[in-house]
Every structure is written in structure tokens, then in C-alpha cells.
Image (tube, grey):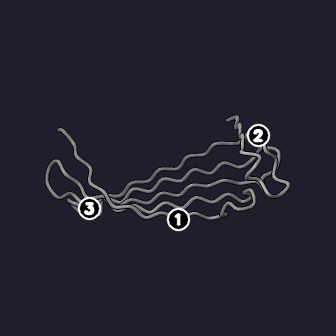
Amino acid sequence: MHERENLDPERITDDHPVRARVWRMANLFVATRRLSESLRLIGVAYVQPDLAGFDDLRTLTDLSLQIALTDNVDLTLRGEWRRDSQPPAGVRRNDVVFTTGFAFSLR
């Protein structure tokens, strides 16, 4: 995939380029596992290395647990981890987020 990144020059405090054009390899991995009749585990991972240098790597890992409450309503517990091996100054290399929500389906 071709990535175009245009950053705000007033927020860049190091030598990170303000504009970058990068060709990245886009890899997607998905796995699901039914743990019981009402419990399902879902894992998704994106791995995107820069084709010009594999030391520049961006990843996203998402793990969800879906709990069936009724036939049409699920409770979802989700954790997400984003990693950029070469972020600009002031941007964290790792970012972790946990969320909880409900999923409604019309079956």
C-alpha cells in the first residue's frame, strides 16, 4: 500500500519528516475461537513494515471478547494496542486502549 503522511509542521519538534511517502507491506491476520455457546474470542493484527526499511514498522493488535447476553445483544470487551517503531517526537511509541460496548444484531 502507498502511505501519504502530512503532519502539522508546528507540532513536529524533531527531525521527523513533515511529509512522507512510503510504500508499506500490508499484512492482516484474523483469528476467532468460540469458547462456549455464549462466548467468542476475536483477534485481529495488522503488520505494516516500510518496504524500504523493515526497521520502520507499524502494528495494530486488537483482541475482543464477545459475550452473548440475548439472541440479539452482545457485550463486547476490547483491547487495542498500536505501535509505531519511529513516531515523531511527542507521539507515544505504544498506545493501549480498552473499551466496553454493546453490539446489536437484527437476525
Q: Indicate which disc, 1 or 2, sits on the residue closer to the N terminus.
A: 2
Q: Indicate which disc, 3 or 2, sits on the residue closer to the N terminus.
A: 2
Residue topped by disc 3: 39
Q: Dot 1 surroundings within 10 Å: few (below 14), some, or many (20 or more)?
A: few
Mark 3–mark 1 Cα distance, whole angstroms, equals 23 Å
Residue topped by disc 1: 96
Is disc 3 placed on a helix, strand or loop? Answer: strand
Residue 62: % across, % down: 48, 57
- Amino acid type, label 3: Leu
Q: Is residue 56 left or right of residue 37?
A: right
Mark 1–mark 2 Cα distance, whole angstroms, equals 25 Å
Q: Is residue 37 left or right of residue 52?
A: left
Q: Quadrant of residue 64?
A: bottom left
Q: Quadrant of residue 91?
A: bottom right
Q: Which mark is residue 66?
A: none
Q: Is residue 54 left or right of residue 25?
A: right
Image point (72%, 45%), residue name = 8
Residue 49: % across, % down: 71, 49
Work out which quarter of the rendered image holds the N terminus and state it: top right
Image point (62%, 55%), residue name = 59
Residue topped by disc 2: 22
Q: Residue furthest right?
A: 15
Q: Dot 3 surroundings within 10 Å: few (below 14), some, or many (20 or more)?
A: some
Q: Residue furthest left?
A: 70
- Amino acid type, label 1: Val
Q: Dot 2 surroundings within 10 Å: few (below 14), some, or many (20 or more)?
A: some
